[in-house]
Each structure stands twice: as structure tokens, then as C-alpha cells.
Amino acid sequence: MASTQNNTPVAASLENPLYYLENARTLISWVRQLHADLLTADELRSLDGLLAAPTDAQALLIRMVMRTQTLYRAQQLEHYAEINTAVPELLHKLESLGLVELEPKVPSDQLADLLNREELLEVHNRFITKALPKSASKGRIKESLATHELPSMSLANWLSSNAPSAALTCQPLFDRLRLMFFGNLRQSWSEFVVTELGYFNYEPVELTQASRAFHQREEVDQYLALNTLYELSESLELTERIELARSIEPINDWIGGRYARLIFGLGQEAERAGETQTALNLYRISGLGDALIRELRVMEKHAPPEAVQQRLALAEPRSLTPLHQLSIARVESRISKKLGSPKAAPKLRSPEEFKISIPRPDQCVELGTAQALGTPDTPIAYVENCLINSLFGLLFWDALYAPVPGAFFHPFQSHPADLYRSAFKARRQAQLYTAWAALDDGSYAEQIFECYENKRGITNAFIHWSVITPELLGLALKLIPAEHLRLIFERLLSDIRTHRSGFPDLIQFDIAAQSYKLIEVKGPGDRLQDNQKLWLDYFVEHQIPCSVCWVTWSDSVDE
DNA sequence: ATAAACTGGG
DNA sequence: TTCACACCGTCAC
DNA sequence: GACGGTGTGTCTCCCAGTTTATAA
Ligand SMILES: [Mn+2]
Ligand SMILES: [Mn+2]
């Protein structure tokens, strides 16, 4: 039933009414094939039990796992046409396998997930003497319930009617399986069917036998622990979350990055709560560039300038992105002024600027400006990051999808797992070299067109197929010199994460002059952002034509 | 009464 | 979970 | 005017059916 082809998991045909079960079994067997050593004996036993159960029982469990809740009224599970056994019987079977709990005790704060507003209000007014009016919103009822201490009890008791219910007890196991398969918790069980329906298309990449997202159980545990802390942000006190987070010692760089982001986020929460010292400590632990900036800003506010300067001296500029360096340079400039030995503010090259006044457009200011500036011979496209990123994705397609060991481990990836890591370039030197060579010998335009034709529609981290029309692609490749593309791609590749954004809003082509120009539009009240300033600086440095257009409203009185 | 938001399902 | 922008306030010149 | 900080919209297939919020 579970299907793999050429050593790759394959989505089930929709002809099979139990397609979702087939997909789940595919996922499970793929994980067991590659990750069996990362599962406990208990977990393997649970899976064996499930896979040996009657088909209808398996199907119902997967239906429940795929839905958002972990708690269900039996009534919510009765409508599945492809499941022919009575639901109570199946739930009973699943209970005997230890996958489901029948008639679970439901705490009052979970009632809202299980009942609609009307039912919730009815329950509220039956258990709480101070009744709420018929019009009370669901949030209001929830609040009121929370202020009273009510004992947990089965749903049937809450409703004092015959309302059978069941809770999944195996959700953690299935989340774990999903994580081990996808390498993230963002993708869901429905990934298979959405692919089968054709809404997602992924580039097929040969998966090596060693292709797996995790190598030790501890890595999976840490990922799950970090994720739980993100989810708890609403319900658990900050101090407790900090304590839990700090007890985690990441065992690899990848987990370390997620850990750093969590700690940074906790630091920001602490900062906003006025817990300055806690925030500073967390920023120091985090090690993220963003955290260093926050640390410096907090120190600037609360510590003597000498202390800030000392901290600045310890910063390692080489490990920081240009974006971080810019922020740090500004701190440096302010602090040195305070200490009496002024150091110049960071100086970036800026492009030509011009102003236009147009009526406030129906759509966004970028489109209004494009309309005002564009002519038949000098057409404008509103592309922002899409054009350059798409050209990049098309030219470097083979590098992006090179079967580097460990980069691809399931068939639903839009990009290699190490795309944003520093070793990305080093591991694809041959493919990158080929692409650079095409740019040098002039064959790149043809290659990009070919890739565009062949790969159109395939989900790609850089390419926005709907924006890139053949006409736009043709103009861009004809009018942007290869040398300019080389310069831009070099900077992009030097730090993909940071440099994939910040490109100007518009590109204007001049067909007669065989030239082009990038235009960043700034409406009233808007201003250049740091990542935009840095790209513009680079464009000016390398004589890549660009400008900033300041827009005011011609039909507006104020200003 | 109507629109907006959410949920499930292929 | 991304990215750009809108909008607010402060500070120094 | 240059900054710093916060919040928002849009987007994560797309359709149908249900639930919720809001106003008249
Ligand atoms: Mn923009
Ligand atoms: Mn803009």
C-alpha cells in the first residue's frame, strides 16, 4: 500500500478513496526505513499496532491526526464515506492500541475548541451563576470561564447529554514522524495530496540512502522542545520559558541557529517587559547578529557610553552581515560623539534622486508611479525582488538542485536544506562554475530561457513564475548586460539570506537606447531601508543604473 | 442580515 | 514565517 | 532629516460549508 518509486516516496493516486492513509503509510515507512534507530521501542510498537489494525481504524486515526484538534466529539467523525465501520467501534479499537483516549476529562479552558458559541454559552450559564447575555462573544465567555475554577470532566458531563468524545494520545508521535520526514514542522500531511492535485510541483532530486534530516534522537528532541517553547508563548510565563529554553544545549549548528533565534525572541520579550538585565543576558547568549544589535541599543539606552564602546570593541565584524555592520557603525558614531572623539557616521553611496507629483493612485504607489513614468518605448515592470531573484534561480537551477549529500531528503523541497548556510557555495563549486561560464560566454540567455520553458511552475525559493512573463524575461536578458548580472549575483551569493531582498521596486527598459534602469519608489512618509541602501550603494559603486523616485500626491492638500 | 474568519477536504 | 511599508516618537542640527 | 521602534498587510493550493463578529 505504501508506495515508493526509485527510492523516493510518491503521493497516492486520488482514485484511492483512502489516499490519505496510503500517504501516511508511505511517510511512516520512509521514516522507519531511514530513521528506525531514532525511534524508541515503544514508538515502534505503537506503529506496528496501528499498521496491523483494521483498515478503517487506521483510516480514522489518520483523519484525526491530520485535523487540527486533538480532541473530538464522535459526532465530528461520522461523515467519512470511505470509512464503513461504526465510529464508536473504531475508537474502541484505537483505544485498545493506546492511540486514543475515550471520554477524556476536558478542562474548562479547552471547551471553546470543542463547542460553538451557543453551546459554550449554554454550558457557561449552567455552571456559573452570573450568566452572560445571549450576545456575549466567544472570547468573552472564555474569559469568564477562566476566572472560575471548574473541575475537568468528560464532554458528556459538561453538556449533560450523550456526547461521546475521544482524544488523540499519539499526536506527539505523529508530530515527531512528520518532523523527521520533512525536517520541519511547517509542512503537513496534506503536502502529498496538494502535490498530487498539482498545486505544488517540486523538482525531483535523487535522494541518497544517507539522506535524512536527523542523525540522533537528541536532535529531534531538541527541535521539538524549541518548537514547544514557541507554541507556549501565549500560555506560559516569560521567566519559565526562559528557564526551559536555557536548559537546552544545542548539539549541532543547525539546532543552534533555531536555539539562537528563540533566545533572541525571548530577549525581545524581556526588553519590552522592561526586564533590561534579563534582555541583555539573553542577547549575549543568543549570539545572533540581530541580538548583538539589540544588546548594543539597550546598552546605549541604559549603560554608560564607555561600556558600550567596550562591547563594540569585542564585536567580530567579520561574522556579521553588512546589514549588521551598518547598524553597528551607527552605534559607533553616536557613542564616539558622546565620548568626545567623533567618528564619522557610515557613508554610503547614493544614487540619483528625482521627484514626481501624481494623483493618489487606486492601487499602490509603485504601480501609480510605473504608470506615470512608463511609455510604450520605455516600459516599466513592478518587480521588486522578483526579477533578480528569478534570474538567479533560473541561471543557477542546476546548482540549487544538485544532489549534494544531505541537502535533499524528501520529495517536497523547494530548495536544498543548506541553502542559507555558509558552506552552500563550497559544496556546489562545479555547478556554480558552469553557470558563471555561461554568463561569460554569452550562452546564459538561451540557457535561462530554456530553463524557464522546462521548469515553469516548479516551486522554487527564488522564482515567482506569475511575475516573470516571457516578455519581461526577454527584455531583461536583452537589456541588462551580463557583467551587471555577474556583479549582482556575486553579491547575492555572498550571503543569500541577507541579499535576496532590498532590490528596487521598478525596472524601466529603454528599447531605443538599449538600456535599463532600476527605480526605487518612495511615497510620502516612506524612506529607504537599510537593505535597500546597501544594494543601491553597490549599484552606484559598479555603475549599475538606478535611482530613487520621491513621490508626492498632486491631489492632496496637506504636506 | 451580511461580511469576515476559520475549517476540512481533495 | 517573509518582506516592505505605514506611522509614531526622539534627537540633533 | 536621520534614526529607532512598532504595527500591519499579504502570503503560505483553492473551493465549499460553517461559525463568528458586527451592525442595523
Ligand atoms: Mn517596495
Ligand atoms: Mn519603495
Image (spheres, coloured by chain):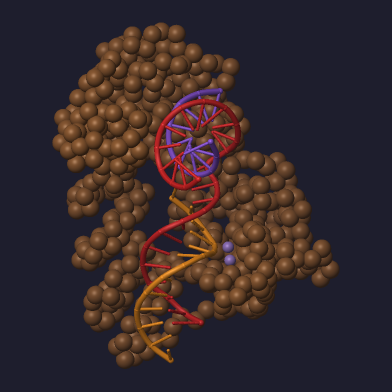
Chain colours: A brown, B purple, C orange, D red
Residue A342 or A526: which is nearer the viewer?
A: A526
The image position of residue A78, as x and y in percent, is 41, 15
Residue A247 or A125: which is nearer the viewer?
A: A125
The residue that appears at 66% across and 51% down in the rendered structure is A467
The image position of residue A280, as x and y in percent, is 24, 65
Q: Is residue A269 left or right of residue A376?
A: left
The residue that appears at 20% across and 30% down in the rendered structure is A127
The image position of residue A135, as x and y in percent, is 35, 38
| Position of A542 relative to A371 (above/below) | below
The image position of residue A459, as x and y in percent, is 59, 42
The quadrant the C terminus of chain A occupies is: bottom right
Residue extending farthest to the right is A512
Residue D16 or A449: which is nearer the viewer?
A: D16
The residue that appears at 62% across and 72% down in the rendered structure is A556
- Name the quadrant containing residue A509: bottom right
- Name the quadrant containing residue A42: top left
Residue A447 in sight? no
Ligand 2 positioned in quadrant: bottom right
Residue A93 in sight? yes
